[in-house]
Every structure is written in structure tokens, then in C-alpha cells.
Image (cartoon, rainbow, N blue to C red):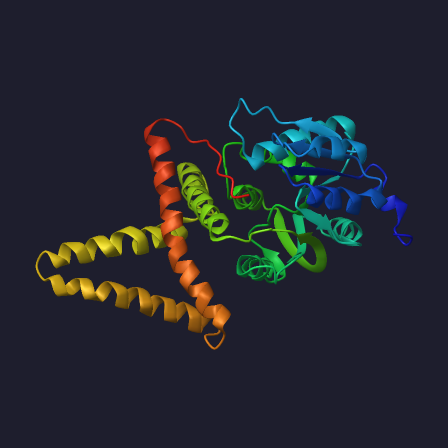
């Protein structure tokens, strides 16, 4: 960090980190930020592993989220940002980061320079990679998931540097969303003619610690809930020019997990042999997905099977959202760690 330019940082940028029982991952996260000397607000969500004390000992301002209200990562980030503004009211940029991520050396400099040079950009993110991609198939899957293309983008992830004026202009994240809050925020930014960029710079090292199928399944359920909730939220905004988000994901999950089996079961009332088509249709779709992603690799076939199984998890999440809507509730929390 000896070549860092102090003028880049002087009161211009602060950090909001969020976490829950991240342990050593949180310590790595905060220590990767220490050389910058930035104001850091760590928002904790009822950790039982000493995370708040660990964060405080490393110079972060700790905010314990009130969990008598529905918890979401979006709400944690908003409240962290509000506290950060009280500490550093003149900052230009805010770096949001999840507590299971470590900031790569040079990222803060590169991202500030980019936003300085692109006044119409509201958000910049970079390359996220998995710390232990070989620890499990699920970790490797996450590593592939983070490998998105660079250039102008429709959305960012949980780690990103944002222009404070743009973030404030759209009133930040939607507190009620339990997943998909970043694409929803970015859609509102794009409606105001701000741009979202992903640049070819190392940004963060993520530690998914996803070692078991149950963790992956709960993540799929959470994704399905998020798809439905964000679609519902953005579809209600009649003035939107970008259109509702996640419509395709919701339809795809419901088709493979509900509509197709239902159609074949109804058809079986007339001819039981129709049910024989069900495994063939699933097998054909799995083969198509595997070939599309490089069918000569075992990983591609495992990924295709998991994606198909995931449609059932997503549908379960969608059904949970529908049930909560019918009860007059939209919030909730689904943890997968």
C-alpha cells in the first residue's frame, strides 16, 4: 500500500461491512481494509461468535441490527450507510462489502479512479473469486458464478463501490427484499440514467464455505423467494421503463417444477404412458444445459443436474413468498450458512 495516493482517500470514501457469525472471515475482511485508514461501519446481525468485539478491536464502528424488525441484508446495508454518513458526512463513495469477503490490494484505488473518470457511473465492481474453490463442488460452482463479463452491466453484487449522491438519489436499497436487492437497486439507478460497470480488476476474495448439499438447497430456496419478491416489487412499479426483474427466472422455475409435471399428470388420466415422457424431458433438458456449458466435462453435467434440482428449491421459495403475500406479509429471512 506504499504507492497509494492519500488524496484519493482523504474523507472521500467509507466502508459498510455486514455479517453474521463470519468468524475468521470477518477478521480477514477488516484487516484487508486496515491499510486504507478508512471509516468502517460493521453491521452485525445477532452473531454469537464474538464478531462485534472482533470488529470493534480492529477499529470498526459496530452497529447491532435490531432483529425485532425483519432482517434483510438490504436493511443492514442501509442502516450501516446511515451510520457511516453520520461519521463521514462529506464522503463521495461508499464501499459495500460482505463480511465473508476480503478486499484485494489495489481495489479501492482502482475503483475510485474509475468513478472519478466516469461521472455518469453510479456503481463499479470488479472480479470476485472464491478462496477455496476446490474445497467442494458448491464452492467451485460459486467461483464460476462470480466469473461474469466485464464492461457496462445491468447489476452488481453485494461487493461494490457506489457513488454516494446516486445511492441517496434512489433512497438506497429496498429494506424489505431478502435477496436480489442489488439488481433491484441498480434498476432504479439505471432508470435515472446512471450506469453500472464491472471492470477487470481483482476486487474481493469470497469464502462461501458451502460444503454440503443442504447449504446449497437453502440458497436455492432463498433465491426463489428473492426472485418472486423482486418480481412482485418491480412489477408493481407501473412507471418502470426497464420492466419487472426476474420474470424469466420465476417462469422457468415454475415451468419445470410445477407446470410440466402437472400437464403430464393430467395427460396420464387419458394415457398412463404419457408419464414416461417426464424423465425423458428432464434428461433432455439436463443434457442441453450440460452441452451448452461444455458437455465434455464432468463438472458441466453435475452443474446441469444441480440446476435442474435447483428449480424445485426455487419453486419452494416462490411458494413461500406467495404464502406470505396471502398472509399480508412480505418480509422474512432465509439463512443458508
Q: Residue at x 63, y 31 (%)?
A: 48
Vertical side of 6 occupied by 278: above or below: below
Residue at the extreme bottom: 296
Tell me where residue 66 sits by quadrant. Answer: top right
Residue 174 rendering spot, x and y as whole percentages: 53, 34
The residue shown at (59%, 35%) is 170
- Report the side of 284 relative to 239 (left or right): left
* Left or right of 269, for residue 214: right
Residue 19 in view (yes/no): yes
Percent coordinates x, y for residue 216 in the rendering: 49, 51
Q: Residue at x 88, y 44 (%)?
A: 7
Q: Is residue 37 above or below residue 155?
A: above
Residue 251 lies left or right of residue 103; in this view the side is left
Can the viewer see residue 121 in this picture?
A: no
Q: Total number of numbered labels?
A: 0
Residue 294 in percent (x, y) is at: 48, 74
Asked whether 104 or 29 is in front, the reply is 29
Outermost residue, right side: 2
Amino acid at each position: 500500500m506504499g504507492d497509494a495516493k492519500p488524496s484519493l482517500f482523504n474523507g472521500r470514501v467509507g466502508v459498510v461491512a455486514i455479517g453474521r457469525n463470519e468468524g475468521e472471515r470477518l477478521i480477514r475482511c477488516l484487516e484487508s481494509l486496515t491499510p486504507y485508514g478508512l471509516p468502517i461501519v460493521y453491521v452485525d446481525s445477532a452473531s454469537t461468535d464474538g464478531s462485534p468485539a472482533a470488529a470493534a478491536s480492529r477499529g470498526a464502528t459496530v452497529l447491532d441490527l435490531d432483529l425485532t424488525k425483519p432482517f434483510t441484508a438490504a436493511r443492514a446495508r442501509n442502516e450501516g450507510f446511515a451510520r457511516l454518513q453520520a461519521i463521514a458526512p462529506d464522503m463521495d463513495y461508499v464501499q459495500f462489502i460482505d463480511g465473508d469477503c476480503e478486499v484485494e490490494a489495489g481495489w479501492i484505488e482502482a475503483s475510485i479512479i474509475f468513478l472519478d473518470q466516469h461521472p455518469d457511473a453510479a456503481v463499479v465492481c470488479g472480479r470476485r473469486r472464491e478462496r477455496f474453490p476446490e474445497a467442494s463442488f458448491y464452492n467451485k460452482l460459486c467461483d464460476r458464478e462470480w466469473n461474469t463479463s466485464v464492461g457496462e452491466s445491468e447489476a452488481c453484487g453485494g461487493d461494490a463501490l457506489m457513488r454516494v449522491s446516486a445511492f441517496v438519489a434512489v433512497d438506497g436499497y429496498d429494506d424489505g427484499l431478502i435477496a436480489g436487492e442489488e439488481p433491484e437497486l441498480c434498476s432504479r439507478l439505471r432508470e435515472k440514467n446512471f450506469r453500472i460497470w464491472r471492470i477487470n480488476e481483482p476486487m474481493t476474495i469470497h469464502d462461501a464455505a458451502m460444503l454440503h448439499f443442504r447449504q446449497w438447497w437453502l440458497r436455492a430456496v432463498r433465491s426463489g423467494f428473492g426472485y418472486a419478491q423482486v418480481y412482485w416489487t418491480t412489477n408493481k412499479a407501473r412507471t418502470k421503463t426497464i420492466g419487472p426483474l426476474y420474470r424469466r427466472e420465476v417462469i422457468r422455475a415454475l415451468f419445470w417444477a410445477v407446470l410440466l409435471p402437472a400437464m403430464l399428470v393430467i395427460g396420464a388420466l387419458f394415457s398412463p404412458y404419457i408419464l414416461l415422457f417426464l424423465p425423458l424431458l428432464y434428461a433432455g433438458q439436463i443434457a442441453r444445459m450440460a452441452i451448452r456449458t461444455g458437455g465434455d466435462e464432468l463438472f458441466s453435467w453435475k452443474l446441469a443436474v444441480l440446476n435442474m434440482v435447483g428449480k424445485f428449491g426455487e419453486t419452494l421459495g416462490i411458494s413461500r413468498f406467495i404464502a406470505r403475500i396471502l398472509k399480508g406479509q412480505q418480509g422474512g429471512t432465509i439463512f443458508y450458512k
